[in-house]
Amino acid sequence: NIIVSPTEAENWATKFRLYSGRPLDEANPVLDTELIAPEGRARVAAITRSLNPEGLSFTLRRHRDKPWTLPLLIKKKMINPLFAGLMNFIVAGGRSFLVAGGRGSGKTSLLGAIMLEIPRKYRIICIEDTLELPVPQMRELGFNIERLKSRSVITKVESELPAEEALRTALRLGDSALIIGEIRSTEALVLFEAMRVGALAHTVAGTIHGESPYGVFDRVVNDLKVPKTSFKAVDLIIIAANLKSADGLRRYKRVVEVTEVKKHWEEDPLAENAFAPLMIYNAKVDELLPTQTLTNGESFVIREISKRIPEFYGNWDLVWDNIVLRAKIKQRLVELSDQYNKPEILEAEFVVWSNEMFNLISEQVKSELGKLDSKEIYKRWEEKVLERINYLS
């Protein structure tokens, strides 16, 4: 906690007003913005006297200077390699998902890491009211990414475009992957309707507050007034949580559940068994473990992806082998980073290059051998990665 003088606090407030273009006064006692400086990035929440009787108050939540990546989150144990491989497969299949959890559970960091799995050949439209996702860093990496800033539902600045209008604008910008920084209000209706009618051809993802799949359903349908039929457009719900140690002194972030939403239900997805867990966190081993629904090939979402890929159609063993291959590659990056003492292997630039090398080698192997031979793909990928590591050395 830092206590500054009233003069300093007023100077801060003035700078945040100018920087954000948002008011902070008696009529608008809350300012929600971001701070970007050479030393780092942070989300800023400022409140003033009409809400806080003791005067100005600021809360700053610092973000990592560089984007999080899935290998970095594996190293931090927030996720495991199988989750990383599964999400790479889901993104490649262009499916929709929501990252849910409580405040500070790592939702935005995880979404940003998954965004890096989208191939750079696709256009990405990102809508946020407070700029937290790593859009500038992704643009520096060569991603074709466009950011739209919408009106905050907290501060409700009239000069900014409402979130639902920003979303309608994004839908008019053409065939793109769509990322919603956080689903909070009436934009949910537009988003889910667009997903339901197939207006979005690539990955659609966002974050939302919710502690369970049913909690997400309750918030979307009952709070945000999205029709139940539109909610079915969500393929996966990923739950992130802030866990505590037994003594309550330590906290750590984990993905605790990956659940798919089945499509054949009418009123209550929980009562009608429409939530099918694919991975569940096991506290005893501190790891996210696959369920039989995933390992036995009973996932509706994965089957839908495989139907559109000739090599995978009707061949679950090959599909599962490919998911495991993607997981093995993510794990290998973590191992190589430790082995060569090169933390840069886990950073965005190297991870994006690795993803593209994997896709390129997969196409080459398929063309040469007539099939996606996982052992050959992995062998060639590892050779390329070791060449790049030696070059960096």
Image (spheres, helix red, strand yellow):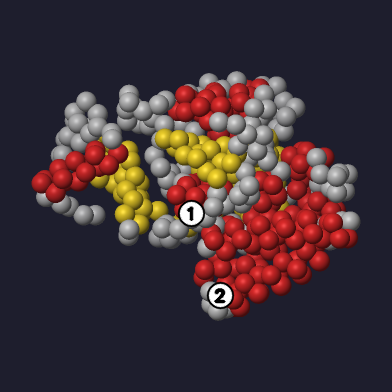
Nearer to us in this view, 17 or 51: 17
Earlier in the chain: of badge 1 and badge 2, it is: 1
The quadrant of the image that shows the N terminus is bottom left
Residue 79 visible here: yes
Q: Could you say which quadrant of the image residue 200 lies in? A: top right
Q: Residue at x 24, y 38 (%)?
A: 17
* Residue 278 in the image: above or below residue 289: above
The amino acid on which the numbered mark 2 sits, given as a three-letter code, is Leu
Q: Residue at x 20, y 46 (%)?
A: 12
Tell me whether the residue at label 1 lies in contact with that at label 2, contact meaning CB atoms closer than 8 angstroms: no
Q: Could you say which quadrant of the image residue 30 lies in? A: top left
Provide residue 270's location: percent of width, then percent of height.
Answer: 66, 31
* Residue 126 in the image: above or below residue 371: above
User: In this figure, which residue is indicated by the disc labeled 1?
Assistant: 140
Dot 1, how many residues are within 10 Å of its Cα: few (below 14), some (14-19), or many (20+)? Answer: few
Question: Which structural element holds mark 2?
Answer: helix
Dot 2, how many residues are within 10 Å of its Cα: few (below 14), some (14-19), or many (20+)? Answer: few
Provide residue 361's location: percent of width, then percent of height.
Answer: 75, 61
Q: Residue at x 72, y 25 (%)?
A: 265
The amino acid on which the numbered mark 1 sits, given as a three-letter code, is Glu
* Residue 240 in the image: above or below residue 181: below
User: In this figure, which residue is indicated by the disc labeled 2?
Assistant: 392
Cα separation, mark 1 vs mark 2, equals 20 Å
Question: Which structural element holds mark 1?
Answer: helix
Residue 327 visible here: no
Provide residue 189's location: percent of width, then percent of height.
Answer: 54, 23
Nearer to us in this view, 80 or 273: 80
Taking the image as shown, residue 67 lies to the left or right of residue 1, namely: right
Provide residue 103's location: percent of width, then percent of height.
Answer: 43, 44
Taking the image as shown, residue 130 lies to the left or right of residue 71, namely: left
The quadrant of the image that shows the C terminus is bottom right
